Image: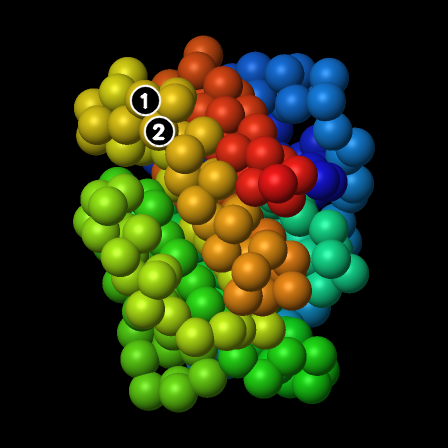
Amino acid sequence: MKIVFHPKYFEVYASDPAATHGRLEGAVSLLKKEYTFVEPEIATEDDILLVHTKEHFDRISAKSAHLFTLSLLAAGGAILASEIAMEGEAAFGLIRPPGHHASRDSCWGFCWFNNIAVAIKRLIHDKKIENALIVDFDLHFGDGTNGIFLEDSGVLYHHMDSIPSLEKFLKSCKKFDILGVSAGFDRYINDWGGILTLEEYQLLGEILGGFARDKTNGRIFSILEGGYNHQELGYCIQSYLHGIKKAYDQ
């Protein structure tokens, strides 16, 4: 398991909850005790244009140099996480800004570029994969990701309603070349959603890790979307990653 992270992700780049000071520090401190950290490079314009229009790219670039750079770096983090997964090692992108509300030509919900879509499209463009499954367990539906792949028969997007519904869905799935996970932790019992416990995040990791083990040749990468309890976000991620490891070890 590798954690994709860059110190610039600590920087405050906007006024929204995903960008606030202190959001990632606790998670980094906790996860560094267990995992190897690797730094990504920024995504290129060509990477972004695999998913977004040139008009959207130019609008984001005009907002501020700082926000633009961090948005490219987040997409670069997702790309690196996907490349690690292609080598058969699970990866988690501890990145920000998030991305699943970014559509081809617009964005909202603290998102600017669609990180997971860029990563998947990059793999397809480079002919490393032919198809992919994206599971999103954030509290909020990833309308951007869904829209981007809605007419793409090679990429299936699924937003989790509940853990039992996710298990039922995965049992119906064929094999895929890779599993990408939009990992939002705002369903946490002490976060906005007030739903899932740490034990349930570990269970999510076991379920998704088991699916990857059995149906994607062990290729799974996850990237951070939501999650706003600064003090406990790291424990949520840690529980989830422990679940993936447990599935791999079985």
- In the rendering, at what x and y percent does residue 150 appear? 31, 80
Can you identify the residue that label 2 sits on?
200
- Vertical position of residue 54 compared to residue 38: above or below: below
Q: Furthest-top residue in view?
A: 231
Q: Nearer the viewer, residue 131 or 206?
A: 206
How many marks can you see? 2
Residue 107 horizontal side relative to residue 99, left or right: left
Q: Residue at 64% of width from left, 60% of height from top?
A: 219
- In the rendering, at what x and y percent does residue 193 appear? 21, 30
Q: Which mark is residue 55?
A: none
The crowding category of the residue bearing disc 2, from other C-alpha atoms within 10 Å (few below 14, some 14 to 19, many at least 20), is some
Q: Which mark is residue 197?
A: 1
Q: Nearer the viewer, residue 165 or 223?
A: 165
Kind of element beneath mark 2? helix
Q: Quadrant of residue 46?
A: bottom right
Q: Disc 2 residue type?
A: Glu
Q: Residue at 29% of width from left, 61% of height from top?
A: 169
- In the rendering, at what x and y percent does residue 198 appear? 39, 21
Q: Residue at 39% of width from left, 87% of height from top?
A: 153
Residue 27 horizontal side relative to residue 208, left or right: right
- In the rendering, at what x and y percent does residue 32 appear? 72, 22
Kind of element beneath mark 1? loop
Residue 31 horizontal side relative to residue 115, left or right: right
- Colour setting: rainbow
Q: Disc 1 residue type?
A: Thr
Image quadrant occupied by the C terminus: top right
Q: In this orientation, does residue 241 appear?
A: no
Q: Residue at 43% of width from left, 63% of height from top?
A: 134
- Vertical position of residue 80 compared to residue 183: above or below: below
Q: Nearer the viewer, residue 122 or 8?
A: 122
The answer to whether the residue labelled 1 contacts the one labelled 2, judged by CB atoms less than 8 Å apart, is yes
Q: Nearer the viewer, residue 196 or 25?
A: 196
